[in-house]
Structures are given as structure tokens and as C-alpha cells.
Image (spheres, rainbow, N blue to C red):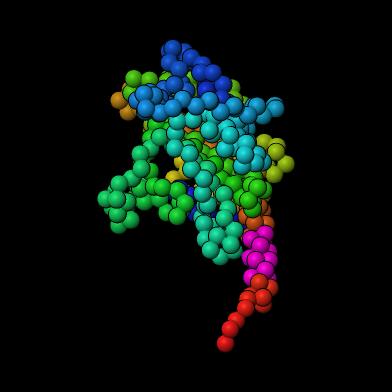
Amino acid sequence: MSVSRFVLIASFAGILTACGPDEKAEDGVSVAAASDRGASKTASAKKMRTPQTKKPVCPPEPEGGKTDIFGISAGDGYDRAAATLKCKYPNLAFETGAWHTDHTEKMFGVKTRQRLRVTDGDECSVQEKMSAQQGRGGRCGERWGGGRLKPRKSGSVTVNVVMTGLPKEEVVHGVWREQTFNKDARPALQVVEAKLIEKYGEPHATKKRTYDKKLFWVYDVLGRPMPKDNRDFDRCKDNVDPSFYRGQGWRTGCGLTIVAEVTESSDQPGMTRFLNVAFLDQNNFYEAQEQMEADLEAARATKAKENAEAAKSVSLDL
């Protein structure tokens, strides 16, 4: 069985579904509004000096889908994923870049789009970047953004989308959505868990620690729930971390894996401080990366041949 691993430097109706109206939690708090409050304040402050633009039209929700994250599913293309992010978060920083193979443009002459990110996190200062590069860690030390995405600090919401494929042929394989709730707008833990189960069904496994609880939905390569007695169940389950900025892994033989992590507030018992939800289509991601490497090599060979032919026609005066 083939395995890959690296560090990817790197939801209630409003949280887990596509661009719908905010719904109220049991305590009357609008969850989507709570998670995006920081972005809303920034947007309000800019209203006096920023021309108003028409809000992007949201793509339709996936038909019969219960495995998406607010409307983005495995197998979607770049355009749909980008449109969904711009629709849901029109006022946040939107960035497109290469991923851990950001060297592809230099090596193969192809500028790829393997990663999308929206966030309300502030850009890191020069001092913060230097501190992170000296081994002190933190998101300002993000390495897998390369000459691609600007290192940014944690905000109230960050969404990362990972894809493979040559330009105009990109396919989504994973989505990570990370939220931090303000102290005055934290939803109840039971509300969060109930909404997750409403969205994805009863979890195939759970893991509880002092302040956080993880819920897992593990599928095989045919899209069927993987039996817990399958020898690959735990390995498939534990490959995907709900935080994009921690270690991620994938392997052949594992299908779509969805993980949600609900973290309780230490100073407000029973209330949610953080909510991270992610999915990764592991087997397809592994195979797509192999194919992409082959496609890039073919593109490099074609480009080299074109350059060689062009060089024959260069005039030279001696």
C-alpha cells in the first residue's frame, strides 16, 4: 500500500452548506455570523471608502451531496471552488497559488493552481516571519505556500482547498475550514455536534479528549462506509487532520475521509471555541498526483522541443 505524508503549510447550515442564509442556533446565535464577525467589522469600516460591487452569484448546492464543505466537493473544478469561496466570503483575502510542487513553473514551464485560500487573518510582519523562520513556528512560518501565498496569522476563519491538474483541468481533492468563535458568540457544543450529524450522518468513529472531540466519517474507494474491523480503518481515519497546518497523510486504499474537530472553550464550559472541518479524497489524490507528475513531464518535454525548434531559426552574425 502506497503512503504519502507531509505538513501542509500550509458548521450548522451556515457552516456546512453552500452559501445559504444564516440559521439560528438554539441559543439564538447566528453561527455563520459569529464565525465571520471579524470580517464583517472590517467590511463595515471600508464601506465609506470602498465602491459597492455586486455580490457574486453562488453556485448551486451539490445534488444529493452530504460530503461537501459549504458546497465544495471532491471532484469539483477550480472555477466552482473559486466561485463558492468568493460568494461565501466576498470581503476576505482570496489567494490562488501552487502547493508543495510550486517549483513546477521553473522546472516544467507550467504555472499551476493547486491551492485556494480565503482568510481574514492579517499578513505577518517581517519580524514575525523572521521569528518563525528561526524555528519558533507559527503560521507565519508557513513553508508550503512558497512564492505563492503570503504568510498570514490566524483569523476567525480560514479555508484551504487543495487540487491537482494542469491549468484549466484542476480537480478538488481536499478542503479544510477552520473557525474561531468570538467569546460573545460561541455556539453550544451539543448544537455543533447535532448539526454535524445532520449534515454528514452518524459518525463512523469518535475520539474525545479533555477539551476537544473528533468525529470521523471514513469511506472506501467505492464510496461505501468502511467497516471498523477493516485493517485499514484506523490508518485511513487518522491520515487526515482537521487543521490544514498540522500533518496530513494519504494512502491508496482509502477513499473520502471527513474529520470534524470541536474544541470546548476552557473559560466557557459547554461552549465551542474552535471548529475545524476537513475532507480529503485520499486514494484519488494519490493517483492524481502521480498523473500530474507525468503530465508535467510531458509538458516540459513539449516545451523543450518547441524551444529547440525555435533556436534553429535564430539568426547569427559572425
Measuring 52% from the left and 28% from the top, which residue is drawn there? 88
The prevailing secondary structure element of the residues shown in magenta is: helix
Expressed as whole percent of the image width and height from the top left, the position of residue 125 reads 30, 46
Query: Horizontally, is 211 left or right of 221 in the view?
Result: left
| Residue 90 seen by the camera | yes
Expressed as whole percent of the image width and height from the top left, the position of residue 65 reads 67, 29
Q: Nearer the viewer, residue 68 or 37?
A: 37
Q: Nearer the viewer, residue 216 or 179?
A: 179
Query: Horizontally, is 23 left or right of 218 in the view?
Result: left
Name the outermost residue toward the left.
127
- Determine if the magenta segment contains residue 303: yes
| Residue 16 seen by the camera | no
Name the outermost residue toward the bottom.
318
Query: Horizontally, is 45 left or right of 88 in the view?
Result: left
Q: Which residues are magenta?
A: 294-308
User: From what the image shows, is residue 6 above or below residue 213?
Assistant: below
Q: Nearer the viewer, residue 103 or 63?
A: 103
- Determine if the magenta segment contains residue 219: no
Measuring 51% from the left and 45% from the top, which residue is drawn there? 96
Q: Nearer the viewer, residue 235 or 302?
A: 302
Expressed as whole percent of the image width and height from the top left, the position of residue 304 reads 64, 70
Measuring 44% from the left and 33% from the top, which residue is drawn there? 92
Quarter of the image with the C terminus is bottom right
